[in-house]
Amino acid sequence: MAIIGNEAAVGARGVESAAMALADRFADAALDGAHWMPALAALASATGSAHGQLVGIGGPRVVPFNWVTGFSQAAIDQFVEIDGGDPLINPRVAVSIGAPVLEVRSEADYRAVAPAMRSDVYADFARDHDIAYGCQAKLAEDDAGLIGLAVLRGERDGETTAEQRALFAAVAPHVRAAVRLQAALENQGLALVRGVLDAVSAAVLLCARDGRIRAATPAAEALLGNGRLRCGDGRLAAATAADTLVLRRAIAAHGAPGPRRPAETLAIGAGEGCLPLLLDICAAPAGPWAFGFRPTVMVIARSERRWHASAATILSLLYGLSDAEADVALRLARGETREAIAEQRGTRLETVRAQLKTVFGKLGVRREVELVTMLADLLRS
């Protein structure tokens, strides 16, 4: 499909026909995220602008996505570093706050709020990247943040004309429809995942940022049933208030918009003479074109096999055992004698006995049989 490439072409074909051609591009993007950047580039070209932009703003440094044609990743990263989502820093964000959805704002609006900015850092950013001019519209806003559409222009492009803003205004409702369609499809994707989870043997829960359980595998349902994990008011909880607080804080952190955090491991439900439940927590993977305002959080209970594969690391993590102490404890629990352990480690028997005494103290056991019982799950392959 040919897309007009300059202002003269816009005038020749008319705003309505140009807008409909662009609308088709954005409808395709809702179904296949790889089309977002070409659609934004077509919008920029049609309005005689250097860049097209679709951005999600959730806070000063909370930018779930920022898709800008012709922009380097370094510039995208710098936008976050300067608190580009802050309405007291960025006049483009400032004029969006309280603005009606789809109302076009442009250079005159930016100038009106510029004196209220508490810093020139965004003005410097706009100058350095030659994006001082342009127009924009808010497509959606809720408690998670807002989504905005914009074209960004430099000194060569100059300020937007009335005709360019008219075309932008005509296209914006179609982009809003595409955004809403993609968001609906992302939610539908979660519904499909629920069905897939029924066939998964691992104990996996999918949670919202507030801890609400969206889906769970049968193994996870079993954990909820035996009390090691609980469901209160639809939200994931642990057996104790203290563990629940730690668990929900971790879920909230991984469910926050923004860059995906590294996975973390929590140990909850530890009791005298028993190992805790080990939970791996991370944001569920999302495609490169997902909006990402409300990431789904995965809570995965480690299986016995996964315990076994990292037993020494787990003992060090949970109980502060040194590498040598963890190795000695695991060898003893596997049935090796103290003498065999000393020989295999190339050390004296007295050293092994001293290490075991320390291990007993750290694990809260008094006898070898208690240690073996405690580590049974950890060692079961």
Image (spheres, grey):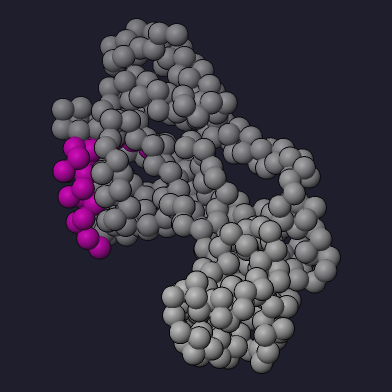
9 is higher (above) or lower (below) than 331: above
The foreground one among 348 and 146 is 348
The foreground one among 104 and 206 is 206
Please identify the residue farthest to the right as the structure is shown. Answer: 225
Q: Reply yes or no: does residue 123 show up in magenta.
A: yes
Residue at left 57%, top 26%? Answer: 31
Residue at left 46%, top 52%? Answer: 260
Please give the range of residues in magenta. 118-137
41 relative to 364 in the view: left or right: left
Residue at left 70%, top 63%? Answer: 380
Q: Is residue 108 visible?
A: no
Q: Is residue 347 visible?
A: yes
- Which x, y percent locates residue 149? 42, 36
Query: How many numbered marks, from 0 up?
Result: 0
The quadrant of the image that shows the C terminus is bottom right
162 relative to 334 in the view: left or right: left
The foreground one among 155 and 319 is 319
Residue 302: image quadrant is bottom right
211 is higher (above) or lower (below) than 141: below
Residue at left 65%, top 71%? Answer: 334
The quadrant of the image that shows the N terminus is top left
- Which x, y percent locates residue 58? 46, 54
246 relative to 145 in the view: left or right: right
- Which x, y percent locates residue 120? 19, 56
Q: Reply yes or no: does residue 10 show up in magenta.
A: no
The foreground one among 280 and 77 is 280
- Which x, y percent locates residue 94? 36, 53
